Amino acid sequence: MRAALAEYGLVLDLALVQHGDFQREGGLRAAEALLAQPRPPTAIFAFSDELAFGCLIALRQRRLRIPDDCSLVGFNDLPMAAYVDPPLTTVRVPMRAMELVLAQRAGQSLPAWERVEAELIERESVADVAGG
């Protein structure tokens, strides 16, 4: 992650990294911590759609408009992501990616290298900053 940021001349700000438990409540707490900062973020990327649902609650509790005040992106493309308001932009990964993660956690032998394609599912929770 640091290398990707550095490629664009950015430095990782650890104050903008919050940890959750992959559940809605964890997303709510993480977003509350982010939004309580002196300069709250204008975009949040949650490492799961469930976390993003919790972030959505925190944003609404502060009466922030999604995506006008803060963009929100999840990860997983859970079926519910298309039905929340606004519909959640998310990253869809193939099942093979999860199989590899679970195999690694179980200590199984893995291929030295395997490419797994992810797909950005653009919905309505992200502002158009390009003006297009």
Image (cartoon, rainbow, N blue to C red):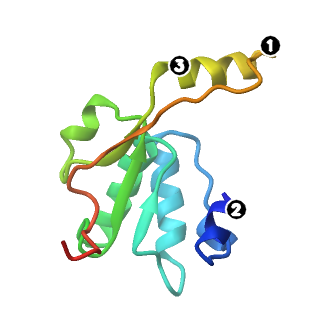
**Amino acid type, callout 3:** Arg
Q: Compare residues 86 and 32 and report the one nearer the observer.
A: 86
Contact (CB < 8 A) between labels 2 and 3?
Answer: no
Residue 103 percent across, percent down from the top left? 70, 16
| Residue 101 versus residue 34 in the image, above or below | above
41 displayed left or right of 127: right
Give the residue displayed 47% in from the left and 41% down from the top: 48
Q: Compare residues 17 and 97 and report the one nearer the observer.
A: 97
| Residue 118 versus residue 8 in the image, above or below | above
Mark 1, residue position:
109
**Amino acid type, callout 1:** Ser
Residue 129 percent across, percent down from the top left? 29, 74
Cα separation, mark 2 vs mark 3, equals 25 Å
Mark 2, residue position:
3
* Badge 1 density bin: few <14, some 14–19, many ≥20, Cα 10 Å: few
Mark 3, residue position:
96
Q: On the image, which quarter does residue 116 sit in? A: top right
Q: Compare residues 34 and 81 and report the one nearer the observer.
A: 81
